[in-house]
Image (cartoon, helix red, strand yellow):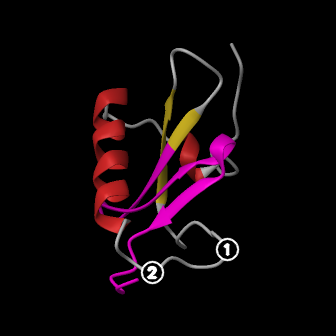
Amino acid sequence: MTQQNVNTAAKESKESSLKTSHILDLFYYVEEVSACQAQPQSFTPPAGAEELTAFDEEGPDYYSVWLADGWPVAIAAPMDGFFRVLTGEAA
């Protein structure tokens, strides 16, 4: 059994009750809503947000969704160089 120091565990390593399909639903929601919003020049995950990750069953790719106070606020498909944030600002 592998031991892990809970005081130094990464925030994103926390178990989530969401299934892969739920994480992907959140990913597609943020992708759709953020399409018409201004995006920052460089991506930095929102401070204090929880990262949820869904792995692609057909390849090495993965998708991340960041939640702040239980709401999706940013997404990433890092291996594709794709990042979006809900900024609330028109493009």
Give how far apart the Cα atoms at labels 1 and 2 are. Answer: 12 Å
Instruction: Answer few, some or many: residues within 10 Å of disc 2's Cα (few below 14, many 20 plus, some between 14 and 19).
Output: some
Question: Eyeballing the image, is 9 above or below 85?
Answer: above
Judge from the rendering whether residue 38 lies leftward or rightward of residue 81; answer left or right: left
Secondary structure beneath dot 2 equals loop
Q: Residue at x 68, y 41 (%)?
A: 79
Q: Is residue 8 left or right of residue 84?
A: right
The foreground one among 66 and 3 is 66
The residue shown at (70%, 50%) is 8
Quadrant of the image containing the N terminus: top right
Quarter occupied by the C terminus: bottom left
Check disc 1: other Cα within 10 Å, few if <14, some if 14-19, many if 20+: few
Asked whether residue 70 is drawn in magenta, I would say: yes
Foreground mark, 1 or 2, reads 2
Residue beneath the point at 70% across and 40% down:
5
Identify the disc placed on residue 38.
Answer: 2
Among all residues in the image, which is located at the extreme bottom?
89
Q: Residue type at mark 2: give it.
A: Ala
Residue 82 at x, y = what percent? 58, 53
Q: Would you place residue 53 above or below residue 68 in this image?
A: above
- Identify the residue position indicated by label 1 in the image: 42
Q: Which residues are magenta?
A: 64-91
